[in-house]
Image (cartoon, helix red, strand yellow):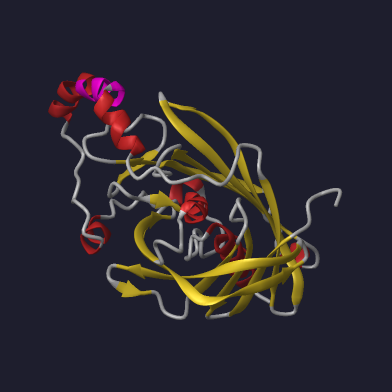
């Protein structure tokens, strides 16, 4: 079995958990200097109906710098952060573990989702979300993978401030840090940056945002999602099908959410996901099923340690 195919399967499974919906890194690792720059996402913003945004020129930055600092601390900025503030069913310290089933591998990899903390992120209140993926034997003997994804998202709206990818594969390490900018926001010197529509979430923050939605009152939604390189249009819909889901962690009454992904107005072919959210106060993601060109994936919630 080719190494690149194993990478494709495992990374797609990880992506299924964090609902990236497309591969963050679809090929074998490359040297850090070969990593592509962040896509400005202009065409995607058009498709999403978002405002096309441009970075200010050098002569404008000095003029706007002090104004931006004032704006971030103004009451209007605080009000904007609290607009559409969703109920948040998760708490700092939450940790969920999943096992990925693929083809004839009943345990190809594991993924842990963590709500690390609430913190100040460059003077803005933020959640720190984290996903850690690891291949298991016998797949690990073919491709050793220990990857980490970090999201810093607004505490009120879960709009993404920064998305990080830390790859540890086959003894090599790479990282990519991307700031998500809106309006006249200026980039920090540490890391890449890209302009995005206001409502953009990153790939990891998306799964937490979907948990905040009241699917009885809002059965469908559409929003831009950034995966560290490209902006996508994600369509989520509550299915009529509901019932009990059986996973290693137990049996759950759950609601099924179907997701589709579009890029530049066209649906990505042969790529569909279904997310089952438990009908409990935490709206726990208990199962993710993915239909992909190379087969089906089933990502199942595992029992908590010690249970």
- Magenta: main secondary structure: helix
Left of 12 or right of it: where is 68?
A: left
Pinpoint residue 147: horizontal percent, then vertical percent: 63, 50
- Closer to the camera in the image, 249 or 273: 249
Left of 161 or right of it: where is 127?
A: right
Location of residue 29 by image quarter: bottom right
Quarter of the image with the N terminus in it: bottom right
Magenta stretch encompasses residue 69: yes
Residue shown at 77%/73% (left/top)? Answer: 106
Residue shown at 19%/51% (left/top)? Answer: 51
Location of residue 79 by image quarter: top left
Left of 287 or right of it: where is 179?
A: left
In this view of the protein, can residue 262 be seen by the observer?
Answer: yes
Q: Is residue 194 above or below residue 287?
A: above
Residue shown at 49%/59% (left/top)? Answer: 24
Pinpoint residue 210: horizontal percent, then vertical percent: 48, 56
- Closer to the camera in the image, 269 or 117: 117
Residue shown at 80%/67% (left/top)? Answer: 138
The outermost residue toward the right is 306
Pinpoint residue 118: horizontal percent, then vertical percent: 54, 32
User: The magenta stretch spans which residues?
Assistant: 67-73
Pinpoint residue 233: horizontal percent, then vertical percent: 34, 63
Q: In the rendered picture of this protein, how many numbered marks are placed on residues? A: 0
Magenta stretch encompasses residue 266: no
In this view of the protein, can residue 177 be seen by the observer?
Answer: no
């Amino acid at each position: 079995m080719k190494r690149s195919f194993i990478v494709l399967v495992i990374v797609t499974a990880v992506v299924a958990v964090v609902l990236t919906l497309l591969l963050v890194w679809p090929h074998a690792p490359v040297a850090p200097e070969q990593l592509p720059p962040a896509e400005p996402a202009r065409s995607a913003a058009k498709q999403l109906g978002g405002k096309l945004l441009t970075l200010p020129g050098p002569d404008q930055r000095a003029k706007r710098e002090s104004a931006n600092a004032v704006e971030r601390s103004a009451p209007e900025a605080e009000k904007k952060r609290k607009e559409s503030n969703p109920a948040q069913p998760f708490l700092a310290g939450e940790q969920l573990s999943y096992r990925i089933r693929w083809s004839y591998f009943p345990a190809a990899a594991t993924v842990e989702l963590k709500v690390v903390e609430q913190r100040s992120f460059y003077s803005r209140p933020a959640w720190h979300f984290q996903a850690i993926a690891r291949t298991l034997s016998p797949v690990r003997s073919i491709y050793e993978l220990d990857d980490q994804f970090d999201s810093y998202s607004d505490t009120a709206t879960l709009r993404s401030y920064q998305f990080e990818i830390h790859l540890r594969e086959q003894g090599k390490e790479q990282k990519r840090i991307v700031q998500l900018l809106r309006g006249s926001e200026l980039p920090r010197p540490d890391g890449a940056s890209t302009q995005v529509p206001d409502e953009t979430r990153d790939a990891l923050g998306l799964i937490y945002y979907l948990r905040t939605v009241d699917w009885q009152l809002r059965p469908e939604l559409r929003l831009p999602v950034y995966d560290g390189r490209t902006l996508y249009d994600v369509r989520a819909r509550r299915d009529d099908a509901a019932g009990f889901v059986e996973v290693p962690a137990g049996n759950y009454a759950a609601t099924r959410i179907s997701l589709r992904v579009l890029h530049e107005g066209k649906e990505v072919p042969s790529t569909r996901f279904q997310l089952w959210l438990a009908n409990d106060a935490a709206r726990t993601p208990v199962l993710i099923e993915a239909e992909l060109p190379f087969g089906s994936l089933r990502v199942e919630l595992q029992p908590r340690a010690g249970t």
